[in-house]
Amino acid sequence: MKKLSLIAILALAISANAAGFTGGASQSNTSGFTGGQAPMNQGGFLGPRYGVNSVKAALSAWDDTWVEIKGKIISQVGHEKYKFSDGKDTIIIEIDDDDWGGVSVGPDELITIYGEVDGNALKANEIDVKRIVK
């Protein structure tokens, strides 16, 4: 009976990891929302994404709004703080040391950042970056 319970728990754990939201996570999931083109053999919604895709929209968005913006890191302005531009507007982004994911970026390289708006009434919105893709 214990073996059967253990097998059932393992099967549930494996199947729980097989689906989910992949718009801001690695493309290793086998199904779920991709917010764009899906890799071969991956299912999911291919329509418009939730959130904002420009610095201008992020500057006026609500706190915790999801962002996916292409642009360049212009300079570092503090510990884990950087000035980011999408070519039209600039915003301060925060990238925790453990969120770089091994990616090295120079000021002339085009990247896509994924994260959430960090806003409050006392200062301009910033972006808390969760993932960077070259």
Image (spheres, helix red, strand yellow):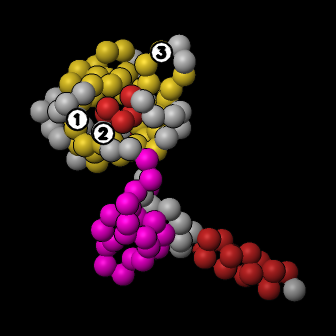
Q: Name the residue under label 1.
A: 86
Whether residue 46 is visible to the viewer of this picture, yes or no, is yes
Q: What element carries label 1?
A: loop
Q: Do the residues labelled 2 and 1 touch (CB within 8 Å)?
A: yes
Q: Do the residues labelled 1 and 3 touch (CB within 8 Å)?
A: no
Tell whether position 124 is magenta: no
Question: Of all residues shown, which one is farthest toward the left?
Answer: 108
- Identify which amino acid the numbered label 1 is placed on: Asp
In front here: 12 or 25?
A: 25
Mark 3 residue crowding within 10 angstroms, few (<14) / some (14–19) / many (20+): few
Please count the marks in the image.
3
Q: Are marks 2 and 3 in contact (CB under 8 Å)?
A: no
Q: Name the residue under label 3.
A: 123
Give the x, y percent position of residue 111.
23, 42
Query: Where 76 falls versus 50 (above or below)?
Result: above
Query: Where 30 falls versus 134 (above or below)?
Result: below
Q: Earlier in the sequence, mark 1 or mark 3?
A: 1
Q: Name the residue under label 2.
A: 54
Quadrant where the image shows the N terminus = bottom right
Q: Earlier in the sequence, mark 2 or mark 3?
A: 2
